[in-house]
Amino acid sequence: MKLLKYLPLLFFSLLHAQEEVVHSVYFDFDKFSLNDKQANDVVDFIKKTDSTRIESIQIFGYTDDIGKEAYNYKLSTKRATAIQNKFIQSGIKNKVIITIEGKGRILIDDDIVENLPEKRSKNRRVDVVLNLKPLPKIEIPGYYNTIQKRHIVGDHIYLDNVLFDRGSSKLTFKTKTELDKIAKLLQKYKNLQFEIQGHVCCTPPYQKEAIDMDTKKRQLSVNRAEAVYKYLILKKISKDRMTFKGYGNTVPLGKGAEYDRRVELVISKV
């Protein structure tokens, strides 16, 4: 039961730590003024951070354990205030600084701490804590065989049954049946805009485009893309949502020649 009691606190701490970045400024004994290097380093720490991610800044001052508690509390507050003043002088807005607090002395056990002078020097410091907003989620375009409810720009829709006979840009009955299904989905998801991309197979490496047997012109991939474009217009898909382009033999699927005689859709706007 005790473990369950503390798990939420531990989980919160881990989440919070992921959104914090800390820079520490170390002071000489009984001092609270900044030298030029300290000042430049701490200001650079703020300014080199993506400003769109900075939610708030907290400044916490500390001292070593030498001296009286009340004096050390005042000294730690002066150290924190010195950092705050430097930030404001450097153009960092005061409203983003939500905490300036002197924490006083950090107590240590003289009997068990090795290298006590070094330990104390690390306690004579100010911690500047940046609270950062989470990084935006990066979405990677995907590959689908039909229109989905949600898409992002760059998604590819491979139309398994929108394939062509060799050297032809004519739509077969099977192809039209598939495009009828696609048209219904496009009418449902009217926000989607896309490029219709035509492809070919079986041309020599030096000849990227193939000849359309009907037109006798070397623009077969373009004609295939345009054929789908015109068919979708007939199915009441607005031409403002579509563009078409031929890619020749430059994007083979590696599944065989049949699958390279194809047209696919690539989402351009959602």
Image (tube, rainbow, N blue to C red):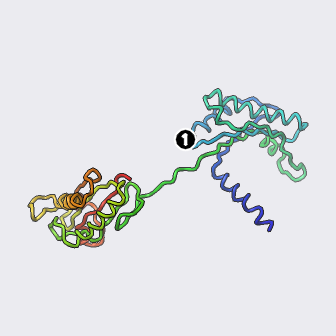
Residue nearest the observer in this picture, 61 or 5: 5
Residue hosting label 1: 52
* Kind of residue indicated by mark 1: Thr
Does any portion of residue 212 appear in the rendered image? yes
* Residue 56 in the image: above or below residue 1: above
Q: Horizontal and vertical percent for residue 62?
A: 79, 40
The answer to whether 2 appears left or right of 99 in the picture is right
* Residue 53 in the image: above or below residue 215: above
The answer to whether 132 appears left or right of 241 in the picture is right
- Give the residue drawn at x 52%, y 50%: 136
Identify the image quadrant of residue 6. Answer: bottom right
Q: Horizontal and vertical percent for residue 20?
A: 65, 48
- Give the residue drawn at x 64%, y 36%: 96
Q: Horizontal and vertical percent for residue 153?
A: 38, 54
Crowd class of label 1 (few under 14; some 14 to 19; many from 20; radius 10 Å): few
Q: Secondary structure at mark 1?
A: helix
